[in-house]
Image (cartoon, helix red, strand yellow):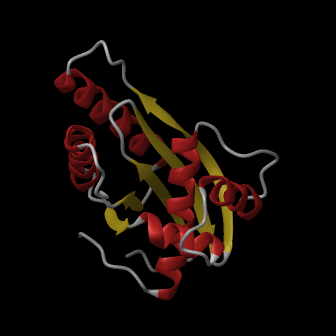
Amino acid sequence: MPTGKEQIIIGIDPGIADTGYGVIKQVGAQLTLITYGSIKTSSKLTLPERLKILNFELKNILAKYQPTTCVIEQLFFCNNAKTALVVGQARGVALFTLIEADLNIIEITPLQVKQGLTGYGKADKKQIQQMVKIILNLKEIPKPDDAADALAMAICGGSLIKTNQFSKLK
């Protein structure tokens, strides 16, 4: 993990239709928003075409903002196996792109994000989004939801880095 005082952290919320991303700068305890958004792919495209777009767009974001660390959501289990497989493929492409860019990667669970931002493991999406708005001193909650989730991961990752409480892939 980088040991310098300033870090650029990107959070990634993987998905096939929308992959949220959020980039923040951390200097000590101070967090500043750099950018956020969503990589969208059309359901009219084949899965390989959608994965290629995800890879291409993520590479562009990494090149533009030069993060040193990425925080990505661990895959959770869901009732729909088909959805889980497709999201898993999108997550795999995102992980490969991040590893290829030689980033430090931290995986966190939705529970860790909820506890990290609100102190409550059963916090709902609105509570998480409100905390992102407050912590980053924003005028409104970031949209779309995937981007707000990615920013929440970046914020939590920054906290984990400060306290050395993380497990990383690299």
For this view, does 81 lie left or right of residue 29? left
Query: Most extreme residue toward the right, as rendered?
Result: 139
Between 121 and 72, the one lying in front of the other is 121
Between 17 and 2, the one lying in front of the other is 17
Between 157 and 124, the one lying in front of the other is 124
- Residue 3: x and y in percent read 45, 80
- Residue 99: x and y in percent read 23, 55
Count numbered badges in the picture.
Answer: 0
> Is residue 6 shown to the viewer in this render?
no
- In the displayed structure, 132 sits above or below 120; it is above
| Residue drawn at point x = 49 percent, y = 35 percent | 38
> Is residue 64 shown to the viewer in this render?
yes
Between 94 and 82, the one lying in front of the other is 82
Residue 1 position by quadrant: bottom left
| Residue drawn at point x = 47 percent, y = 55 percent | 10
| Residue drawn at point x = 65 percent, y = 72 percent | 118
- In the displayed structure, 72 sits above or below 20; it is below
Query: Most extreme residue toward the front, as rendered?
Result: 79
Image quadrant for the C terminus? bottom left
Query: Most extreme residue toward the top, as rendered?
Result: 44
Residue 147 position by quadrant: top right
- Residue 161: x and y in percent read 47, 78
- Residue 97: x and y in percent read 25, 46
For this view, does 120 lie left or right of residue 154? right
| Residue drawn at point x = 20 percent, y = 38 percent | 82
